Structure formats: C-alpha cells, structure tokens
Image (tube, rainbow, N blue to C red):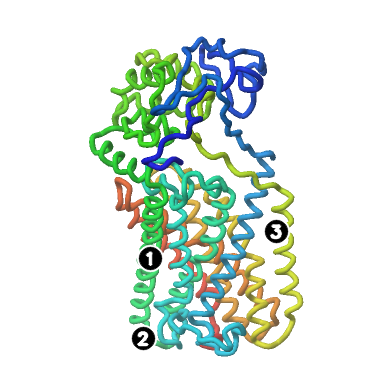
Amino acid sequence: MLDHDSSPSPKALVPYTTSGAHAREGPKAPFQAMTASDGNDANGSSTSTRKDLESPTLNTFKGQFTFEDNANIETKQDNRWSFDKKKRVLIKSMYLSIFAIFGALLRIMLAQLFGEECKNPGTVGWLKAGQPLCVTADGDTSVEGGIIFADLPANLLGSFIMGLMQSTTVLDLPKPMAVAWLGDDNPFQSWDVIHLAIRTGFCGSLTTYSSWNSEMVVMMLGAGQDTGSLVFRGLLGYLIGVETALASFVLGKNIASYLHSVINPVLRVEAEETRTKKERGVFINTELPDFERRYLSDFNMGGYQIHINPGAIENLSRWKESTELYRRVGNDKLAILTDIEYRAIVMGESLDDHMAVSARECGWEIEALERWVTLRHELYLGDRGMADSEFRFIPACIIFIIIIALLFAGVEFLDHDDEYAITYRTMLYAALLAPGGALLRWRLSKLNGKISGVFNWLPIGTFIANVTASIISACMLGVELRYYGKVGFWKLGSARAAKIGFAGSLSTVSTFISEVAGFLKSPNPVRAYLYVSLSLGSTCACATIFYSLVSMGVEKNVYY
C-alpha cells in the first residue's frame, strides 16, 4: 500500500509488452472475463497481440519522467487453493480443533490462577511456589463470592481478542480487510483458516457460557442459605458477566480501529472522506480495489494521483459519468450496479445477460467498463485483494495428530492418586473433548439466519449451542455431586471433562457478545436486549431443571 504522500513507483501503470504470456485478446460482447494468473485468453489462446485491443498508445508519466510503452512490469499471480472443497473443510476442522484445545487449556489455567488454588490449596502444582490471585469463586454457597465467577477472566480475555480480531467491514472502515489492525498488504490478512481458528476455535473455547451459567444456577439454588439473597446474587452475576464481556469486546474493537488508523494512514484519510460522503447519501462500494474505489467515489487519490494519457482512464471515466446518479443510498438500481462492478472488476468474470440488459436500460456505458477491465489487466494498479493463503492437508494433519497423541499420552500416564496428577489429568482430558464441542458449535453456526418468521433475526445456531451446552454442563455438575468420592477417575473425570471441555467449548461468550454488539449497532437495537434476555432466561431455566433432577436427593455441600 502506498503512503498518502508518496507517488507510485516508476513502473506503475505501465502497459505490458505484447509478447509471450502477457498478450491478451480484446473484449467480446457480452463481456468475456480474463484472469491475471495465466497468459491465455478466454479461449485458451496466447497468440493474440497488443494491437488486437485497438486501444490508443498509453504514455504514462509522473513529473519529469517518461516511460517506454513496452516496459515490463511484474504481475501478481492468483494464489488459489490447491485442494478440493472437502479437504479444505478438513483442514479448517483440524486447525479449529488445535486452537480450541489451546483455548480450553488457557481457560482452565486462568480459572486455577484466579480462584481454584485459593479454594483447594495444593491442587495446582504450577502455582505451588507462586502467588495465586484469589479474586474469583464458583457458585458454591460455602465460599464467599461467586458473583465474580471462576471463568470471568477467561470470558473477558476471549471477548477482548474477539473484538481485536474484527474485520474492517464490522468496524465500518472503507477497505475490506480480514484483520483491521494489520496493514492491508500484511500476509496474515490472507490466512483465512487461521482467522477462523482464532475466532471460532480459540476465542470460542477460551470463553464459556455453560460454566458461567452453571455457577450462577448453583449459587441461586443455594444450600441452606438465604435463598432470596442468593437469587439476587445470581441475577447480578448474569448482569456482570454480560456487561464486562461486552466492555472487553468493545475495548478490543476500539484498539483495532486505532491501530488501523496508525498502520494505514491512507485508509484513515479515506475513512474520514467516507463518513462525509455517507452523510450526504453517497454510496461507497468498499469491495472495489483501491484505485477504482477512490476514483469512482471522487476521493482524494493521494498516492494514486497520476498523470496519464486520457486513453487509459477514459473508459473508467465514461463508466463513472454514466452511473453517477445511481450511486445514492436508496436508489433502486444500486444493487445491480454494485453487482456488476464486483463481478467485472473484482472477480474478473463475465456479466450475465440480466446484468448487461439492466446496464443498457439505465444508459450505463457497459462497453467502457468492459474496456477498462481489459486494460487494467495490463496495468499495475495495486492489489485487487489478497487471495487465501494455502494451508495444505498433510502438515495440518501431522500437527493435529501430534497434539492429540500428546494429550492421550498425558491422560494415560498421569495415573497417580495425588491432587496434582488428578488436576493435570483432568485438564488434559477436558482438552481432548474441546474440539468436539468447538466443531459442533461451528456447524451449528451455519443455522444462523436460517429460520423464518418473527425470530428470523435470531442467531439460532449460537442460541442452540449455548442452551445445549448449559444443559450438559448442569447434568455433569449434578453427576459430580451425586458420585463424588464414590467412583474412580474415569467416571468422575469423564463428567468433569464433558462439563469443562466439551460443554465449555460448545458454548461461547465471545460469539454471543459479538452478536449482541452487532444488534446494538443495528437499526433495531432492542433485539440485543431480547437476545440477551432470551438466552439467559432459557439457559437458566433449563440448567436449573436438569441440575435439580440429576442431583435430587443428594445431601448438599458433600461435594463442595
């Protein structure tokens, strides 16, 4: 990305030579797409010459410099996935599982650091010589606290990272970037597999809705205490959990926006211009490449301000003039206009008959757009958008197998009766079950937006995941209470691992809070409060019923 005050490099906007792989065939009607990744035309031929384009000679210059018409420039090759769709899903699943394991382990360690070692001294070996931070407690009524629940630190950290990892689209910034706080040319922007693994796998498993809900339910049910005050404590615990997580998420977003403005000064200026134009009702197509987005929106071109033979820019200028009146928010032709520009300029694909007919009915210079797209393939105008980085199947499989094998080995060989061994064994066992919960949550997220009717806005996939996980967590908590001290590690440890690992990773606070934040910014912010109330009310009611049924008849306080 060029700095705002910089000029394009001498090779900027210099035509390709006409020989070899860079030759292109002229446009056809309807528009025939060509890709920049190979030297063939749409028919697979590479024998056409430069004059086939029948375009004027382009003399590109900046200041006192003059460039040769036949100067060579570099091309940016398309970097496409080298595996089919099923392998890509498997690779995503493996990386998501790996990051889910790390997220679950960090959540357990934070719970121990901030409270577990204080409740049960000597059970956390790595804190033996350290100073535990006794600030949290679970819902046990024999321990003072509980409102500052055990998983609060993990929920805050996970929500903060989720906010930090938001895209520029979510932050309402001009240029689409997967990670807002990085430069637009940073290679990490194209690591979409890792983005999914961090947001869905790591943050989703680092935060837990089900354990938080279970702690509040246990506290509200009480054990020979003042039930009324415990109920109010639990309600306050729910309120604190939502508000603090939302504040952490917003903090992460704000830091991401600030870093974006520092690292991308040109885009910062564009963001200010964008806000001004939006206030005037002008629509900005943020999905377009840098040059077209700035030129078509009448932005300050900055480093893109060049002097060029009118033959190079004439076609884009004609397209701009013919469509200018339609670039207004609310125009009924705006949707087809953005579709045409995205398909032609961004994707480099042919326009279908409907698009071509609609464009001509509106009087748009569709031929000028076709001509410009053909010419831009031969000009270095900057990146059109980074292609997805390639993450291969074999390395992902090897990493996944090694981590799972290490967890299995730890669970198997830590076969001792001391508290340290039981603690670490349970941690590793829970981490083994974390991928199952995270993957199920990922698949359930596909249901979001799929229901119809009054609640078509509800993120039903996230809602189902949190309710299901809360029921599982409450049931496993009841099993622990019923069988504590009566069975061995595998039965009791399985219940704990299912509660902490599977249910903890199936549920999520980070995604839940990001959805709430999205509703708060929407035209109908009341949906945020409905979503929070529906989620908290449903999970609390379900967990209370199932926990009471499973633990019925068990003497209280025998476990805690």
x, y (%) of residue 559? 56, 85
Residue 297 at x, y percent in the picture: 33, 31
* Of residues 432 and 12, the one drawn nearer to the viewer in this rendering: 12
Q: Which residue is mark 3?
A: 400
Above or below — where is 445 with respect to 161?
Answer: above
Q: Amino acid at mark 1?
A: Val
C-alpha span from label 1 to label 2: 25 Å
> Which residue is labeled 2 in the image?
226
Considering only vertical position in the picture, is 395 above or below 548? above
Give the number of the mark in front: 3 or 2: 3
Q: Position of residue 420 (x, y in %)?
A: 65, 85
Left or right of 322, for residue 109: right
- The total of numbered circles placed on residues is 3
Q: Which residue is mark 1?
A: 242
Q: Nearer the viewer, mark 1 or mark 2?
A: 1
Residue type highlighted by circle 3: Phe
Contact between labelled residues 2 and 3, with CB atoms less than 8 Å apart: no
Marks 3, 1: nearer the viewer = 3
Q: Residue at x 28, y 37 (%)?
A: 278
- Which of the two residues, 6 or 355, is positioned nearer the viewer here? 6
Q: Residues within 10 Å of mark 1 (few under 14, many from 20)?
A: some
